[in-house]
Image: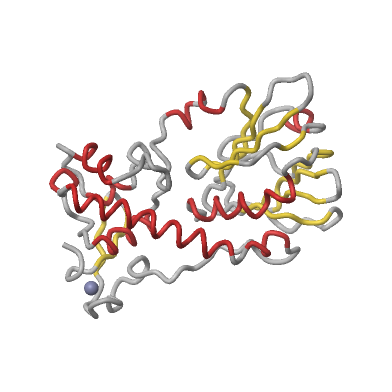
């Protein structure tokens, strides 16, 4: 599933090919997604110029300008299996290539999504007023997210620290992989009650979240060329992971067998020696 680093890498990968370009044609081969493609989207987009792309949580924001009209934004979510890539005009679509935004100059932004849990929606007015974005907590790589915030919001909370860390109201974009890895780096047992963890341990946890996400984004940068290849999928990168997906294997730090538990309906792998 595309997580925050993949969405951020996508943003960086496609930006040079779409920013400042005008959309000359929209091809929709499929309208049925988690949110159906809005009626009339094709006409609304043609002739608009793409502004500076941004990202909020796992949403990609594509501002679109046209002289004499209020700015609007495409809100793009990659869902479980979505990906965006750049192809040359005339490149035949493959199976599950559902949406093309044709740019002036001959490049095409192409959306591929086998499971169709992703979506693209059209926002008028300011992005901040959209209810999907308004409720979100801070970005994990921003200064607003730190150990003090984790400590303050966790007081009196009895749930385990891992689902607490994955709550979008606490911080956005920390999915199962990165929550598991950050808890390992910080030496915190994912089952520990959120409200009973000391401030200094939350400082370590916030730093670990930033570290694992930054490493993933940096690594994603090495696969940027894949966003402009006509073949294959854009590179969703396999990081060297310490615990996620490694239940039953030896801990890389101490050699003990890694264990899996279920927390908040999600599998959690951890080391009972290194994490307490
Ligand atoms: Zn260990």
Quarter of the image with the C terminus in it: bottom left
**Front residue (pair 118, 270):** 270
Q: Tell me which residue sits at (34%, 47%) in the image.
A: 166
Instruction: Look at the picture and state if 131 lies above or below 34.
Output: above
**Residue 70 occupies which quadrant of the picture?**
top right
Where residue 174 appears, as percent x and y from the top left, is: 39, 50
Instruction: Look at the picture and state if 134 lies above or below 50.
Output: above
**Front residue (pair 96, 100):** 100
Q: Is residue 57 left or right of residue 127?
A: left
Instruction: Look at the picture and state if 201 lies above or below 231.
Output: above
Where residue 188 appears, as percent x and y from the top left, is: 21, 59
Q: Is residue 122 left or right of residue 59?
A: right
**Front residue (pair 160, 203):** 203
Which residue occupies the extreme front position in the image?
Answer: 143
Its colouring scheme is secondary structure
**Residue 71 occupies which quadrant of the picture?**
top right
Where residue 269 appears, as percent x and y from the top left, is: 29, 64
Q: Tell me which residue sits at (17%, 53%) in the image.
A: 192
The number of numbered discs placed on residues in the rendered structure image is 0
Instruction: Look at the picture and state if 156 lies above or below 269.
Output: above
**Residue 208 occupies which quadrant of the picture?**
bottom left
Q: Is residue 229 left or right of residue 155?
A: right
Q: Tell me which residue sits at (20%, 44%) in the image.
A: 159
**Where is ligand 1, by quadrant?**
bottom left
Where residue 181 appears, as percent x and y from the top left, is: 34, 62
Q: Tell me which residue sits at (72%, 45%) in the image.
A: 99
């Amino acid at each position: 599933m595309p997580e925050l680093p993949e969405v951020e890498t996508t943003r960086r990968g496609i930006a040079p090919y779409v920013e400042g370009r005008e959309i000359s044609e929209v091809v929709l081969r499929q309208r049925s997604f988690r949110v159906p493609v809005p009626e009339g989207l094709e006409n609304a987009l043609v002739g608009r110029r793409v502004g500076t792309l941004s990202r909020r949580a796992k949403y990609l924001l594509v501002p679109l300008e046209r002289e004499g009209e209020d700015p609007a934004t495409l809100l793009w979510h990659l869902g479980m299996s979505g990906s965006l890539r750049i192809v040359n005009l005339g490149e035949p679509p493959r199976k599950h290539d559902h949406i093309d935004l044709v740019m002036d100059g001959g490049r095409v932004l192409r959306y591929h999504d086998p499971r169709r849990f992703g979506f693209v929606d059209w926002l008028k007015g300011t992005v901040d007023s959209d209810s999907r974005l308004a409720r979100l907590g801070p970005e994990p790589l921003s200064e607003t997210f730190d150990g003090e915030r984790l400590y303050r919001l966790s007081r009196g909370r009895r749930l385990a620290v891992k689902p607490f860390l994955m709550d979008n109201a606490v911080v956005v974009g920390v999915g199962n992989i990165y929550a598991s890895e950050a808890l390992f780096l910080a030496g915190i047992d994912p089952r520990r009650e959120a409200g009973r963890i000391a401030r200094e341990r939350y400082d370590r946890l916030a730093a670990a979240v930033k570290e694992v996400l930054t490493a993933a984004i940096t690594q994603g940068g090495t696969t940027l060329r894949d966003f402009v290849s006509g073949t294959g999928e854009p590179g969703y990168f396999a990081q060297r992971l310490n615990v996620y997906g490694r239940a039953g294997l030896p801990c890389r730090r101490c050699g003990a067998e890694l264990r899996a538990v279920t927390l908040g309906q999600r599998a959690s792998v951890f080391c009972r020696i290194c994490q307490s």
